[in-house]
Image (cartoon, rainbow, N blue to C red):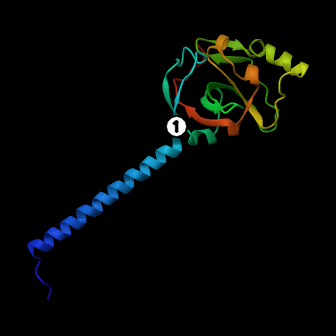
Amino acid sequence: MTPLSTPEADKQRQKMLLRRVEWAFLAVFLLGALAVYFTVQRVVVHGRSMEPTLHDGDALIAWKAEARGKLREGTVIVFRDTNGEELIKRIVFVQNDQGTATPPENVQIPGSARPWKALFREYNAELKSGKAPRPTSANTIWVMGDNTDNSDDSRVFGPIRRDQIVGVVYVKDIGPE
């Protein structure tokens, strides 16, 4: 025969069950916090290079996991330059692994499209003279600020490497008008 439950034993079982529920909730909360820590990063826009899309002082979330995914033209990314400073720019061209893809004829920027050759004229001249770094198979991503007249981007420092990318920022896509 099993002993009858007493009110004191019932209270003990309820207390133990409540403690288990509390621990389970805490474990789920901590796992969620760790997942967020390793997948997102808060970034703040500095400067005017991404206007009118993003403004100086805007706080954004960059998804780190997306940085390892397929990158395409139009995606806004956060990356570290050679000095370790984090910059926010839009991808305007992704070179294929073979290095055979050609840049687009026009670069889509908010409100219009501008010719690649006109935007990258100075960089191409510096490349020909040997002053600009020559792109390699590792440097395959060309970035530019939306405010093309007020942006230091791939036209100044050349293309970036995939391992420089910190994360992807989701903003309203732009397209042909």
Q: Does residue 69 appear in the picture of this structure?
A: no
Number of residues whose C-alpha sits closer than 10 Å to that of mark 1, classed few (under 14), some (14–19) or many (20 or more): some
Q: Is residue 36 above or below residue 103?
A: below
Residue that appears at 80% across and 13% down: 121
Quadrant holding the N terminus: bottom left
The spot of residue 61 in percent (x, y) is: 50, 32
Q: Is residue 108 left or right of residue 125?
A: left
Q: Is residue 39 left or right of residue 145?
A: left
**Residue ranking furthest to the front:** 83
Q: Nearer the viewer, residue 147 or 115?
A: 147
The residue where tag 1 is placed is: 41
Which of the 4 image quadrants contains residue 115? top right
Residue that appears at 61% across and 37% down: 166
How many labels sit on residues?
1
Quadrant holding the C terminus: top right
Q: Is residue 113 above or below residue 73?
A: above
The spot of residue 151 in percent (x, y) is: 66, 16
Residue that appears at 75% across and 19% down: 155
Q: Nearer the viewer, residue 76 or 84?
A: 84
**Residue ranking furthest to the bottom:** 1
Which of the 4 image quadrants contains residue 109? top right
Q: Is residue 39 left or right of residue 77?
A: left
Q: Does residue 59 appear in the picture of this structure?
A: yes
Q: Nearer the viewer, residue 8 or 143?
A: 8
The spot of residue 114 in percent (x, y) is: 69, 12
Three-letter code, disc 1 = Gln
Q: Is residue 100 above or below residue 55?
A: below
The spot of residue 8 in percent (x, y) is: 11, 72
**Residue ranking furthest to the right:** 129
